[in-house]
Image (cartoon, rainbow, N blue to C red):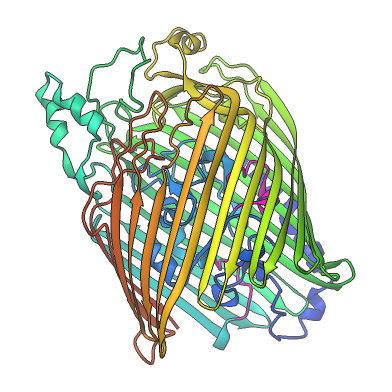
Amino acid sequence: MDRYASLARFLRSAALPAILLTAPALPAAAQTQAEPPPDTGAQHGHDADHPEDIVITALIPRSHIDILGGTSVLTAEALVRDLRPSLGDTLARQPGVSATSFGPGASRPVLRGFAGDRIRLLTDGIGSFDASATSVDHAVAINPLLADRIEVLHGPAALLYGSSAVGGVVNVIDSRIPTRLPTGGVDLQANGTYGSAAEERALAGKTDIALGGGFVLHADGSWLKTGDLRTGGHILGATQRAQALASDEPEIRALADLSGRLPNSALENWSYTGGLSYIGSGGSIGFSVGKSHSGYGIPVRYVTQEEDHDEHAGEEEGAHEHGGAEKVRIVMDQTRADLRAVVPVGGGFLDQIRVRSGWADYQHAEVSADNPGEVHTRFFAQGLETRLELIQARHGGWDGAIGGQLLLRSSHIEGEEKFLPRIDSATYGLFTLQSLDLGNLRLEAGVRYEHNRIDAAADEDLGSPDHRRSFDTFSGSLGASYAIVPDWRIGINLSRMERAPTADELFARGNHAGTQAFELGNPDFSTERGWGLEGMVHGRGRDFHVTVSAYYNKFDRFIHDGIVPDAACLAVSGGASLEFPCFAYQQSGARYYGAEVQADWTVAKIGPASLSFDGLADVTRATLDGGTPVPRIPPLRLLGGATLQALQWNARIEAEHSFRQDRVSGLETTTPAFTLLNASLGWKPAGLSNRLSLTLTANNILDVTARRHASLLKDYAPLAGRDIRLTVAIRL
């Protein structure tokens, strides 16, 4: 009954307001089949409508040079070249972005060292409705295989999507709800990929069909299957290999030589979606309904030494194997419905009214990989998100957006790994972003008020009573940029951030194999607060472009987890023994600071051909009060490449160097430096340049062992070894 109640709320709060808003415009629109104005639904249009340097997640499409915060856009050839089964691995080459890399099936983006609830993952402006923020072994329910473009956004515009988006926003933009009439009546796209490292086979396709009268039908689908991932060297990290070699048991000593395929890392997923839109000169309205399924293995965390659960002070993080000695596989299903409506107002104070809603029913089961009928734990969640956006008409140099947001969520866990009670939460937000262009000087301000209510039901299994917490948070930003010379701007942005604690941080109290911890929340936590300062320089000329960003964030009452004596967890476990070390969420001060530099330069042009160089560098440093490093912060990274571009083909070679990370907390191991050498070759046959393309890429050509420090599983699951990939894309 819960899912039907959620669906009813979705219809009442999303569909009906959208119909009411669009009703005045639809009769007039029905009398014409003309192409809608270029800005109708522009924030979600096809990539062809928006150049790479235009960021549309900020509601008012702008060049990234004009945005007060670091941004990046992945589209066209770059998206094809970097596309991977998971969202985290797809974005890992973008400035300021790393990934949790919990095996190939579950990899979530990490932005400027922030992960989990401190970044918002969106599909077409609405949240992902999954459990990926709860634990790193839970996959993101967003399919990058069907993306038109992916944007990463920091700065004031991130306030449009939630006060918890301290690290930023990732928005995967697709065409599930059509926003324009297809040229020629039909638009068909399909692509297929083969990757050698995991014997990856992927197919994806989508089509828009004009039905006449302004109606457009959409359908898409994808399928992906891999075997176990082949790595570049030893599976275990140096510390774990040394522990294994010191063991008296032959079975454990043999683990030191484990190499090649990463055990239990195979995955398979599929999805399909249908959508229908009405598009006319008086506005547009559309919806989509889709289903996605994913099954993936959790790479094994091998026990390499005997451990005493009563003395954890010297333990290495993640020294237990997930699910004991048994291999675990996660089977995830999600049903999702989305709605979008756009009404051009065309004058006065407002230019457009936009409504965007999404509803989803999500569940996943953690099962035995050797006995799929044996279910250990089940996660269930239903969610509804609705946004109303009022886009102001531009008057002189003033423009902006005002809006409201509603997010309802219900979740519960059943089975062995139940570490949270049933949670019902509601978030209500009001926001505005205002911009004033005075020529050389541009000013921007954003404000967001958010009310969060979290209800935790009494749970006999966890020994927890009823809890209700509510939080009111205010976040804001104020920034300015100045054109020192044409096409060169310097900017500064000051922000005040407040974030309500999550349900995990408040109410967790149980063994959680995904994080290898007995997690203990604190229901008395107050809001997390902080100040942020970011400075930036954007510049471009005829043949080059440069972006430099530097940021500093200081937090009060920063929420983090850390190991504590077992007595703290035993006090709430009913006296039962702990399966994992006791980790309790705590609040203290923290500082994050870092920088990102990105540049490209076209050094030569010969007829239609050009040669360009590009590079980026990023680094983040994070420290808790008292001097302890924040765990899993990515090290300094450098990436540089050269691209030769011609009419029908392009070639690229690049190298990425990740430095050694030895600034670690007491429970982490040092991560060695590594260098990845990659190359790609793209070809569009003459006469079919806009219809057929072939892309051949070679990643980790030197077959090195690489581990991301941001990964909780880095010492047990290295990145892919040498991987040769072929992608064929067709557009008709």
Residue 570: x, y in percent? 46, 10
Position of residue 507 measured from the top left corner of the image (x, y, whole percent): 58, 23
Frontmost residue, 343 versus 70? 70
Q: Is residue 609 above or below residue 361?
A: below
Residue, x 50% and y 56% (percent of image)? 597
Residue lying at the far front of the rendered structure? 484
Residue 301 visible, this orientation: yes
| 1 and 239: which is toward the camera | 239
Q: Which residues are magenta?
A: 154-181
Q: Is residue 466 above or below residue 349?
A: above
Q: Is residue 357 left or right of residue 319?
A: right
Left or right: 177 as drawn, with respect to 386: left
Position of residue 390 relative to residue 631, above or below, is below
In terms of image quadrants, where is residue 278?
bottom right
Using residue 359 as the reference point, say whether residue 510 is left or right of it.
left
- 319 shown above or below 10: above
Between residue 704 and residue 584, name the one nearer to us.
Answer: 704
* Residue 687 as seen in the image, left or right of residue 703: right
Across and down, in percent, residue 223 comes to: 37, 61
Q: Position of residue 82 (x, y in %)?
A: 39, 62
Front residue of this view, candidates 647 and 68: 68
